[in-house]
Image (cartoon, rainbow, N blue to C red):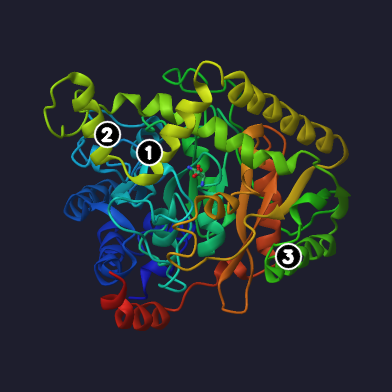
Amino acid sequence: MADLTQLSLTEALQGLQRGDFSSRELTQAYISRIQTLEPVIHAFITLDLEAALSKAVLADRLLSTNEENLPPFTGLPLAIKDVLCLEGVRCTCGSMILENFVPPYTATTVQRLLDAGVIPLGKTNTDEFAMGSSTENSAFGPTHNPWDVDRVPGGSSGGSAAAVAARMTPAALGTDTGGSVRQPCSFCGTTGIKPTYGRTSRYGLVAYGSSLDTVGVITRNVADTALLFQHIAGFDPLDATSAQEPVPTYTLPDSPDLKGLRIGVPEEYFIEGIQPEVEQAVKKAIQHMEGLGARAVPIHLPHTEYALPAYYIIAPAEASANLARYDGVRFGPRIGEGETLWEMFSETRGVLFGAEVKRRIMLGTYALSAGYYEAYYGKAQKVRALIKEDFIEAFKQVDLIAAPVAPSTAFKFGEHANDPLAMYLEDVFTLPASLAGIPGLAFPVGYDKNKLPVGMQLMGPHFSEPLLFNVGHAYQLASNWHKCWPEDELIKNTAFEKKEEIR
Ligand code: GLN
């Protein structure tokens, strides 16, 4: 039988439904790949492969009934970022403070996929509490980029993106607070959506920056993204900021026609310091879209440069409050008894949180403290309003905005690890959409000279996911970047050669 892991999610579902192969065969194909590549890629924190196979056998029983109304994803394996709760399976958030935390409930987005019939393969690696852009902040060790195992896969959903790129899963759930779906997609050549804030439920997503957190999907192409996203989007009474807006059916065009589409090209996203090959690939993709009938319109988003400082006040401020609950009393282990309660708190948190998380807690606490609140947090909120205003103004002139996802392709391990500012700069193009709460679709549009993928993002007004999917799909109908994957030989040879060295 052909290698079933070559199939896209949509093709795999069709094959399952037609009876071309069983869920057990499909799931086993992914398990075999995981067993071969996981020692090198390290995309997962927790694997649940035996349970996955048993569920596949059950799914096959359902599929063999040929019933009309089977859940749409019956028998489809899938990976889940380890910040989303799945009842009974430990959820670490990439942190020692939650090393053995087994949630007693399931996140709404995960539950919706379980109800639709998916089979969880495991929980994917992430920067600790989703704080980071490389997975180097994971307490369980970093994930390696399948295109070049000496490089990071991006972050924080790096485990999810690497697992999809290495074909260890057909798709994965990720989360995006400031770029964590889009940037790993860019680094790993995968396609993914960071939705409008409130479009996907945050219930059961371990909170980082509550006013920014979103749940998205990472797949191999736009059609798969739209199909999977259809099932996780929508109102949830369990999340107070969930949007009431109904979810339309995401139908995609069957021809690559972009006639009449106005694409904004923001000058502020093509700045000095951006890797020239990234700029070239993204501009070429825009030209390609013009060839399909779209019109590129130069625009300005004048407050773009303030997004980074504003985000790195707001996100840590919210994180410092959200992470106060990990105190050695209610979750996770306790370190030392201490003389006083405060000593026990500080010892537990001091030992079990990683350096970046502690940095954010300190930054955030400072920004929120009496006397500084207005100067930092208050000001950052005002900047956030200006950034949102920039987008509102731009969308009066254009239908959507095209830009690079990140200023560079995947960087090497350690390149930014000791320089937090350099790491934060990786997020310069993803943070504005996060602050504005608008959606962003990331997909591959080229390679750099090292054959590393380059990603582009399309940003649209609130709830414009259908338009983003349409345009992204039209581009993919007329291009092949989403069909390029790291060659097996490349992953295996380089990986096994370097394995000793890097792990
Ligand atoms: N890199 C950004 C940060 O560290 C974004 C992370 C995310 O989206 N979760 O905060």
Q: Is residue 210 shown to the viewer in this render? A: no
Relative to 76, is 310 above or below?
above
Quarter assignment of residue 254? bottom right
Q: Which residue is mark 2?
A: 349
Disc nearest the viewer among 2 and 3: 2
In this view, the mark in front (3 or 1): 1
Question: Foreground: 66 or 479?
Answer: 479
In the structure shown, which secondary structural element does the residue marked by tag 2 occupy? helix
Secondary-structure class at tag 3: helix
- Disc 1 residue type? Lys
Label whose residue precedes the other's in the sequence (2 or 1):
2
Which amino acid is tagged 3?
Answer: Glu
Judging by the rendered image, the residue that carries numbered circle 3 is 279
Is the C-beta separation of discs 2 and 1 under 8 Å? yes
- Percent position (x, y) of residue 113? 38, 39
Residue 349 in view here: yes
